Image (cartoon, rainbow, N blue to C red):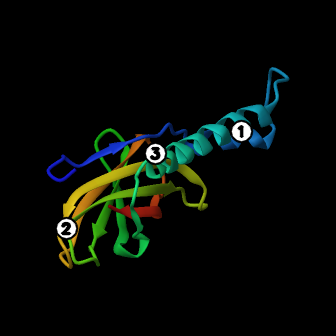
Amino acid sequence: MGGRRMRTICAVSLMAVLAPAAAGCSDGGGEPSSAVSRASAAIRSAEASAKAGLKKIKGGANAKGDVKAGSVSLDKSGRAMARITITNKSHDTADYAIEVNFRDADGDLVDATLLRVPSVRPHTPKKAVARSHRKLTGHITAQIGHAVRY
């Protein structure tokens, strides 16, 4: 797996922009809760997709302690970019798969992605960037869900 370019995979996301529908404003008599349910289902799907990618890795070790999420900025298209630092605490060069969860100012999950970082040398910090799959707005933070070293 060494030498593979860093890439993100997996995830469908939906912003919590639909959450205001929960306030009950509906001119057409529709169910605001159904829009919120669809948004919640899409976010759960994004998180499940990232976790499924992690489960495909055989022989990996839990490495959440090796990974730190830093600040988040928005690129020109409005996608969130989280700075990730990986410090390989093993004695051998290893690849990493990292579930990165993006959260809004209320702490609600608004996107999730799986970041793969190849060839991280022992005890040498390596920087990477995790990107959201769609435009996000407001104050966004990144959180490490799970990380696997393999």
> Which tag is nearer the camera, tag 3 or tag 2?
2
Q: Which mark is residue 36?
A: 1
The extreme top residue here reads 28
The structure residue drawn at horizontal position 21% and vertical position 72%, both measured from the top left corner, is 92
> Which tag is nearer the camera, tag 1 or tag 2?
2
What residue is shown with label 2?
Answer: 93
| Quarter-of-image position of residue 37 | top right
Q: Which mark is residue 136?
A: 3
Above or below: residue 99 compared with residue 45: below
Q: Looking at the image, tell me whether mark 3 or mark 2 is earlier in sequence order.
A: 2
Label 2: few (<14), some (14–19) or many (≥20) C-alpha neighbours in 10 Å: some
Residue 149: x %, y % from top left? 34, 64
Above or below: residue 64 compared with residue 79: below
Q: Secondary structure at mark 1?
A: helix
Amino acid type, label 2: Thr
Residue 118: x %, y % from top left? 22, 56
Above or below: residue 138 compared with residue 79: below
Q: Nearer the viewer, residue 105 or 40?
A: 40
Is residue 145 left or right of 27 when viewed as pictured?
A: left
Q: Secondary structure at mark 2?
A: loop
Q: Nearer the viewer, residue 43 or 150?
A: 150
Amino acid type, label 3: Leu
Q: Looking at the image, tell me whether mark 1 or mark 2 is earlier in sequence order.
A: 1
Residue 127: x %, y % from top left? 22, 64
The structure residue drawn at horizontal position 45% and vertical position 52%, both measured from the top left corner, is 54
Q: Count numbered badges in the picture.
A: 3
- Give the distance between the C-alpha atoms of the residues marked 3 and 2, in whole angstroms: 34 Å
Is residue 3 left or right of 50 when viewed as pictured?
A: left
